[in-house]
Each structure stands twice: as structure tokens, then as C-alpha cells.
Amino acid sequence: MQLDDLYRQVIMDHYQHPRNQGSIEGGVGDETLSVDLKNPTCGDEITLQMKIEEGLVTDVRFKGTGCSISMASASMMTEAIKGKPVEEALALAEEFRKMMKGEEFDADRMGDIEALAGVCRFPARIKCATLAWHALERGADKKN
């Protein structure tokens, strides 16, 4: 099996069986951050919800519609940042940005997310892949 085929399978698995999809159930006094973003170029939409407690992303969920790249990226991102410090999540977002620009990035930190590396060859799809990551950054900005 070729590496590109394996990467396609990982992307399709996250698209067809998204992780952390849905809404965070809130309690009284709950401080769940919510960010809504749209990609007007292709129509992708995402609502990212994060619960950040004492600097940790304790829960993260997303709802959205869009292409396989957009939804798979959101699924992979939520898996990667759940339970991590906000600073680590933002550092991962920076590595993802480098990967999307075709720059050198820390592949060891990326895990399944590296399956999206080939997107950088298709400039029109980069916005699809980065939508959830922009929502993460906006959510972290709201918290600060």
C-alpha cells in the first residue's frame, strides 16, 4: 500500500466516523467557548466548542458541514487537543500552519494529522483544512 493511499484512508475514516462531533452539554455556570466560522469559498461551516479549565482543553466538540478535508481536519484536531494545555494546542496549530504552507514541520507531533500534508499541493483546499484550526485560535483568543 502506498503512503498516499494510507493517508487517504485516514482522512476518509475521520470524515465518515468523526471524533468529538456534537455539542458540549453545559451545566449551571458552565463556561463553554463557542466559535462559528464559515469558508465562503466552498461553503464549509463549523461550530467549535471548547471547555477550557485551568489552562487545559478539558472538552472539545464540533458540528459542521463541508467537504471531507474540512470535516476530517476538525475531527483530527479535536482528538489531538483534547486534554492538552491551551499553549500546546496553539503550538500544534502553528505546526499545522507550517505543514499547510509546505514548510518544514515537526511530524512527530502531528500523528494522524500528517495525513493532511498533501493538501498543501492544492491551494484551494488549504482553507478547508485550516477552518477548524482558525476556530481553535479564535476560541483561545476569546478565553484570554
Image (tube, rainbow, N blue to C red):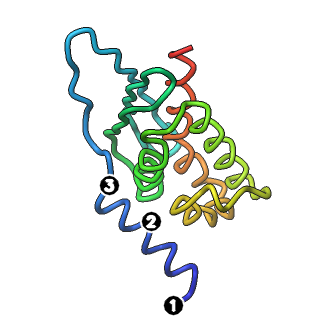
User: How many residues crowd around disc 3 within 10 Å: few (fewer than 14), some, or many (20 or more)?
Assistant: many
Compared across the picture, whether 46 is left or right of 95 comes to left
Q: Please, what is the three-letter code of the amino acid marked with disc 3?
A: Pro
Could you tell me which residue is drawn at 40 percent across and 38 percent down? 45
Q: Please, what is the three-letter code of the amino acid marked with disc 2?
A: Ile
Q: Earlier in the sequence, mark 2 or mark 3?
A: 2
- Alpha carbon separation for disc pair 2 and 1: 15 Å
Q: Which residue is mark 3?
A: 18
Q: Quadrant of the C terminus?
A: top right
Q: Earlier in the sequence, mark 2 or mark 1?
A: 1
Whole-percent x, y for residue 123 in the image: 66, 55
Residue contact between numbered discs 2 and 1, judged by CB atoms under 8 Å: no
- Alpha carbon separation for disc pair 3 and 1: 24 Å
Compared across the picture, whether 128 is left or right of 96 comes to left
Q: Nearer the viewer, residue 10 or 80?
A: 80
Whole-percent x, y for residue 1 in the image: 51, 90
Residue contact between numbered discs 3 and 1, judged by CB atoms under 8 Å: no
Quarter of the image for residue 61 reads top left
Residue contact between numbered discs 2 and 3, judged by CB atoms under 8 Å: no
Whole-percent x, y for residue 20 in the image: 32, 45
Mark 3 secondary-structure assignment:
loop
Q: Which residue is mark 1?
A: 1
